[in-house]
Image: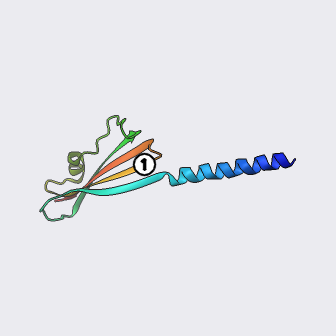
């Protein structure tokens, strides 16, 4: 009976650790990529692409050109890149462009 209780306690402990790692293993990072001398502007455009294992990007388009088109921007002021990762398996790239 004691061995069974120890087994249950260990299993519960390891399950909690695994669940905690899954919750804590997602991250998001936004970095400035470029800036111009143009005014900041009021428009913002975004383009998002999802990849797997950081490299398998089937038809993903998170380009500066696509983000500018999505926001109706012809004069780019700033470009930021946001990266979200879940265990390095599912990675989402978002290009954020501001300008006029």
Q: Is residue 19 left or right of residue 100?
A: right
Q: Residue at x 55, y 50 (%)?
A: 22
Residue assigned mark 1: 85
Q: Is residue 6 left or right of residue 64?
A: right
Report the front residue among 5 and 44.
Answer: 5
Question: Which residue corresponds to the image point at 23% horizontal and 46% vertical from the top-left?
Answer: 66
Count of picture labels: 1
Residue 81 drawn above or below residue 53: below
Q: Position of residue 82 (x, y in %)?
A: 33, 53
Which residue occupies the foreground of this view, 6 or 53?
A: 6
- Identify the image's colour scheme: rainbow, by chain, secondary structure or one colour: rainbow
Residue 29 location (% of width, % of height): 37, 56
Residue 50 place in picture, x, y as percent: 37, 42
- Vertical arrangement, residue 35 with respect to residue 48, above or below: below
Residue 7 or residue 43, whichever sits in front: 7
- Which residue occupies 14% across, 59% down? 36
Residue in the picture at 47% in, 46% down: 87
The C terminus: image quadrant: bottom left
Considering every residue shown, the one lying at the far right of the view is: 1
Q: In the rendered view, does 18 fall on the left or right side of 34? A: right
Q: Residues within 10 Å of mark 1 (few under 14, many from 20)?
A: many
Which structural element holds mark 1? Answer: strand
* Residue 100 relative to residue 49: left or right: left
- The location of residue 47, given as percent across then percent down, is 29, 48
Quadrant in the picture for residue 34: bottom left
């Amino acid at each position: 009976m004691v061995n069974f209780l120890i087994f249950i306690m260990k299993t519960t402990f390891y399950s909690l650790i695994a669940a905690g790692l899954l919750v804590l293993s997602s991250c998001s990072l936004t970095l400035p990529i470029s800036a111009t001398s143009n005014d900041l502007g009021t428009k913002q455009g975004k383009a998002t692409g999802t990849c797997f294992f950081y490299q398998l990007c089937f038809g993903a388009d998170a380009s500066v050109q696509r983000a500018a088109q999505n926001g109706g921007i012809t004069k780019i002021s700033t470009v930021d890149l946001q990266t979200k990762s879940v265990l390095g398996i599912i990675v989402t790239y978002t290009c954020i462009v501001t300008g006029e």
